[in-house]
Image: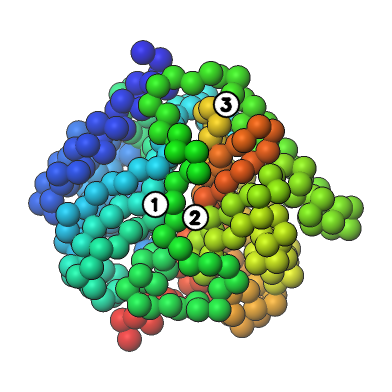
Amino acid sequence: MSPVQDAKALVQSHYAALASATPETVEAILARNMTADALWRGVHPFNEQRGPAGAADAFWIPFLRSFGHVQRREDIFFAAENTTQDVGSVWTVSMGHLMALFDAPFLNIPATRKIVMLRYAEFNKVANGKIVETGFFCDILHLMTQAGIRRFAQQTAAHLVQPGPRTHDGLLMAPSDPAQGARTLAVIDEMIEAINIANANPGALSPHDELAQSWDEDMIWWGPEGIGATYTIDRYIEQHQGVFRRHMKDRTFNGHICRMAEGNYGAFFGWPNLTLTNHNGFMGLAPNDIRADMRVVDVYRRAGDKLAENWIFIDMLHFLKMQGVDVLGELAA
């Protein structure tokens, strides 16, 4: 098999083993496929850890103590070579939900004893038959809403348990035509450049005309809790882009750890992607002059020459905490 297909097989085997993990066994299961010094990045409060022990102690053991009968309900899975940092390294992307019974408190979020769906996106870098680097994003605010705690009830778009691709073709287990992945990556790169141009010269194009260069008119933007999901270019402008650009200033793009595509799917994440200032009360926060970071995942589905769907994860708890808003601390108070 190719390095890309080898990486897919390794990570899928890793996920299959995790399906039977317990708090007592999860570190050993992680150690089967992770190197001892693997870098594991997770959203706040998990942050950066090293090796199976670090990942287990920070996230997996507390998670498995709180959630029972966990199922990984994967909607998107693909792999490709990285095109940004460490160009040519092989990464996988998995996205979907960890479905479970919420049976004990987690991060001070009260248990419901009901089914919950934890949105996740995970990037794994594979080298020499081992996972050497991971980026694990999950939407903790979205979980809180399912538990009845709506910390940002004024969000501008919709709260939903978000489905996978409309086309139901996001699990790319078999090899894909490299030309299709290149085509997807080109559209993503063009979209990023359009944002850079708009930031430099906001009046050059209308928001609609800017977006229509890269996006389908019926685009679906599956945004994180605190912002929400929105549909069509015009509603995206109304319910997110316009709000974001009016309330944020001095946006600095910091680059991506990984940017890749296979077939009609592409993704990237940064650590952080953006640094900006909340100068006009974004998400209902008080305006401030603090330079705050956004660690972001974007996962895309391309249709023809346009982006049709986009799933977004933002490390909101980290972004908020940098501005003095400790959401998890509030729950503990």
Mark 2 secondary-structure assignment: strand
Residue type indicated by callout 3: Gly
Question: How many labels were placed on the picture?
Answer: 3
Q: Classify 250 as above or below 211.
A: below
User: Is label 1 in contact with label 3 (beta carbons under 8 Å)?
Assistant: no
Can you give x and y, in whole percent of width and height, for residue 278 in the image?
Answer: 65, 72
Q: Is residue 267 above or below residue 163?
A: above
Quadrant of res 192: top right
* Residue 207 in which image quadrant: bottom right
Q: Which mark is residue 313?
A: 2
Residue type, label 1: Tyr
Residue occupying image coordinates x 45% and y 56%: 162
Look at mark 3 in the image and give the residue it sits on: 181
Mark 2 neighbour density, 10 Å: few (under 14) some (14–19) many (20 or more): many
Q: Earlier in the sequence, mark 2 or mark 3?
A: 3
Residue located at (19% from left, 70% from top)? 113
* Helix, strand or loop for disc 3: helix
Q: Mark 1 or 3 closer to N-term?
A: 1
Alpha carbons under labels 2 and 1: distance apart: 8 Å
Label 2 and label 3: CA atoms lie apart by: 22 Å
The label shown at residue 120 is 1
Q: Residue at x 55, y 19 (%)?
A: 178
Amino acid found under the numbered disc labelled 2: Phe
Name above or below for residue 239 compared with residue 37: below
